[in-house]
Image (cartoon, rainbow, N blue to C red):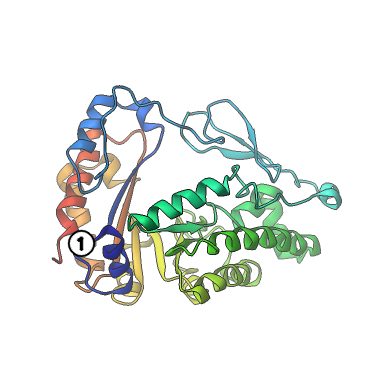
């Protein structure tokens, strides 16, 4: 079974061979860890890193908003800043922190940008064609933070929430502008006939969401539904990612057309996730990066991942798992995560 077929079977509850496992390294890791030791770990885990090739020195590539002390202004006019190479910055300059600039404010062109970074559609076409020719899974979608986060980047978080509470008419027009841009970007991706379309957007905090369910339903959910509908109609799998506690928003997300929900384990609760989704909606589980894997022991890490597989997974499928490594996690713990992900990928086989 190819990786593409295995992933599709997991999503569709069609008895995959393995639980799809993804381990991502943040670019900053290459500056914070011994590179040889980190590469040893990758080489020792071929299920997670099947195409790994050792390099004498890894020169990490940073995105435009991941360069230390180099402010970056994106095509919407939002200024980003970070203090560690490889770590995505935060927006410190909001182009519409004052509505006085709204009359002349214009959206960027989805032909040349995804809203955050420049886009080369010819290169994307080539990558998609190569993936299809080699039997790979083709994933498209909007950039992270495409709607709610984009709006707060443009207006500022407090301004945006007060706008919504007050029923400010200009925020409705701004939402429409952002949606029109995103719809254009989605259409370009759908022309390439991907297997999966992703709509990643952080909505949660440590406890509860950043936006009330009432405001979410009024302002954001209808936009999500309209953006996701063309993908569903074309037969694409709709994937949604959100960090944080999103329990009070999940029903609205699923109702909006989400087929794969990527959410964090401990902040939402393993048992709650299982009670809500096990056997019915595919969970792309984001493995803890705050507690157990950061400060626990290798045996505690193994126990966590085993429990998640046993509690949420089924032989029919419906579970994928992902882990993101960031600086600060001991390499021994990173190795324990890799070991457990490879060990329990075949738990139901």
Residue drawn at 32 percent across, 22 percent down: 57
Residue 288 in view of the camera: no
Residue 25 position by quadrant: top left
Q: Quadrant of the C terminus?
A: bottom left
Q: Is residue 61 above or below residue 211?
A: above
Q: Is residue 180 above or below residue 105?
A: below
Q: Quadrant of the N terminus?
A: bottom left
Name the side, left or right, on which 161 lies relative to 186.
right
Residue drawn at 37 percent across, 56 percent down: 133
Where residue 5 appears, as percent x and y from the top left, is 28, 65
- The residue under label 1 is 18
Where residue 61 appears, as percent x and y from the top left, is 45, 32
Residue 142 in view of the camera: yes
Q: Secondary structure at mark 1?
A: loop
Residue ranking furthest to the top: 56
Residue 319 position by quadrant: bottom left
Where residue 117 appears, as percent x and y from the top left, is 59, 42
Where residue 104 appears, as percent x and y from the top left, is 85, 49
Residue drawn at 24 percent across, 47 percent down: 48
**Mark 1 Cα shell of 10 Å, populated few (<14), some (14-19), many (≥20):** many
Nearest the viewer among 36 and 192 is 192
Q: How many marks?
A: 1
Residue drawn at 66 percent across, 54 percent down: 151
Name the side, left or right, on which 268 lies relative to 106.
left
Name the side, left or right, on which 197 lies relative to 307.
right
């Amino acid at each position: 079974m190819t990786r593409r077929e295995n992933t599709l079977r997991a999503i569709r509850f069609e008895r995959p061979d393995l639980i799809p496992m993804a381990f991502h390294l943040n670019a900053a890791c290459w500056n914070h860890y011994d590179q040889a030791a980190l590469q040893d770990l990758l080489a020792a885990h071929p299920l997670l890193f099947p195409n790994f090739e050792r390099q004498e020195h890894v020169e990490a590539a940073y995105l435009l908003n991941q360069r230390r002390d180099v402010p970056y202004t994106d095509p919407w006019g939002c200024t980003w800043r970070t203090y560690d190479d490889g770590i995505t910055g935060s927006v410190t300059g909001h182009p519409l922190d004052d509505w006085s600039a709204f009359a002349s404010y214009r959206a960027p062109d989805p032909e040349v940008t995804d809203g955050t970074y420049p886009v080369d559609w010819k290169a994307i076409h080539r990558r998609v064609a190569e993936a299809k020719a080699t039997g790979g899974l083709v994933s498209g979608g909007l950039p992270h933070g495409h709607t709610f986060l984009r709006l707060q980047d443009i207006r500022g978080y407090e301004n945006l929430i007060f706008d919504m509470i007050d029923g400010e008419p200009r925020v409705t027009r701004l939402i429409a502008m952002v949606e029109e841009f995103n719809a254009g970007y989605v259409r370009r991706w759908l022309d390439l006939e991907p297997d999966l379309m992703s709509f990643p957007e952080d909505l949660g905090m440590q406890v509860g969401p950043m936006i009330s369910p009432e405001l979410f339903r009024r302002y954001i959910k209808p936009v999500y539904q309209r953006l996701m509908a063309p993908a569903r109609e074309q037969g694409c799998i709709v994937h949604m990612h959100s960090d944080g506690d999103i329990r009070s928003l999940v029903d609205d997300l699923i109702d909006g057309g989400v087929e794969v929900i990527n959410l964090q384990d401990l902040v939402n609760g393993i048992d709650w996730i299982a009670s809500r989704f096990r056997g019915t909606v595919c969970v792309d589980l984001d493995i803890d990066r705050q507690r157990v894997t950061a400060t626990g022991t290798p045996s505690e890490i193994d126990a966590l991942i085993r429990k998640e597989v046993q509690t949420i997974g089924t032989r029919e499928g419906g579970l994928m798992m992902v882990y993101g490594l960031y600086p600060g996690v001991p390499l021994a713990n990173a190795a324990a995560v890799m070991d457990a992900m490879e060990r329990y990928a075949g738990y139901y086989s």
